[in-house]
Image (cartoon, helix red, strand yellow):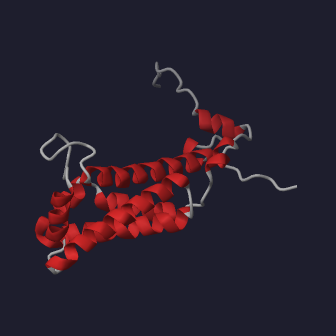
Amino acid sequence: MTISHSAPRPADPAAVLAARGLRLAPPWASPRFAWASALLLRLGLAAAFLSAVADRFGLWGPPGTGNVAWGEWGRFVAYTGAINPWAPAWMVPALAWSATALETALGVGLIAGVWTRAVAFASGMLLLAFALAMTFSGRGVEAVLSYSVYTAAGGALLLAAAPAVPYRALARGGQRARTP
């Protein structure tokens, strides 16, 4: 005969609630969490786009300043040519302006919540194109991974698949307004 001197283990709180007919849902199962996460992703992508555009025009500081990638338009155009070696020289400034215009429009669209799914899809496609251009231009995959470009592209595409909910829905816990 063996005698156990250990104290009984306390019951699992979720199991106790389930036995009483109550269910303990994880926080990520609530609609408010889903919509707040989508909002955070929207604003994060928008900030990344608009920050990159600001850097191209020197708004974060001149070249050589800490955490400044380009610091001036000319350096960004040169970078655009480097990651698009297939493009003739006359096309590189047009590519740089196109990327800048798209990133500005997509950033503003994400903040405003206008056509969220379409803007998120376009953001994902632009980021994926940028990631592939970086990967296959001789820069290699390390820079793309260090800058989390594939992650941002995946997040944008996931946002495109999520239900679009306007800002005002957050005040209602992620629920749409009821119609009479």
- Looking at the rendering, which quadrant does residue 67 occupy? top left
Residue 5, given in percent of the width and then of the height, sits at 46, 18
From this viewpoint, is residue 81 visible? yes
Q: Is residue 166 left or right of residue 154?
A: right
Q: Say which quadrant the C terminus sits in.
A: bottom right
Above or below for 32 versus 136: above
Residue 168, given in percent of the width and then of the height, sits at 66, 47
- Looking at the rendering, which quadrant does residue 89 occupy? bottom left
**Image point (83%, 56%), residue name:** 179
Furthest toward the right, the residue is 180
From this viewpoint, is residue 161 visible? no
Above or below for 24 versus 139: above
Residue 39, given in percent of the width and then of the height, sits at 52, 49
Near-viewer residue (170 or 47) = 47
Q: Is residue 127 left or right of residue 145?
A: right
**Image point (52%, 27%), residue name:** 9
Q: How many marks?
A: 0
**Image point (61%, 37%), residue name:** 14
Near-viewer residue (134 or 28) = 134
Residue 15, given in percent of the width and then of the height, sits at 62, 38
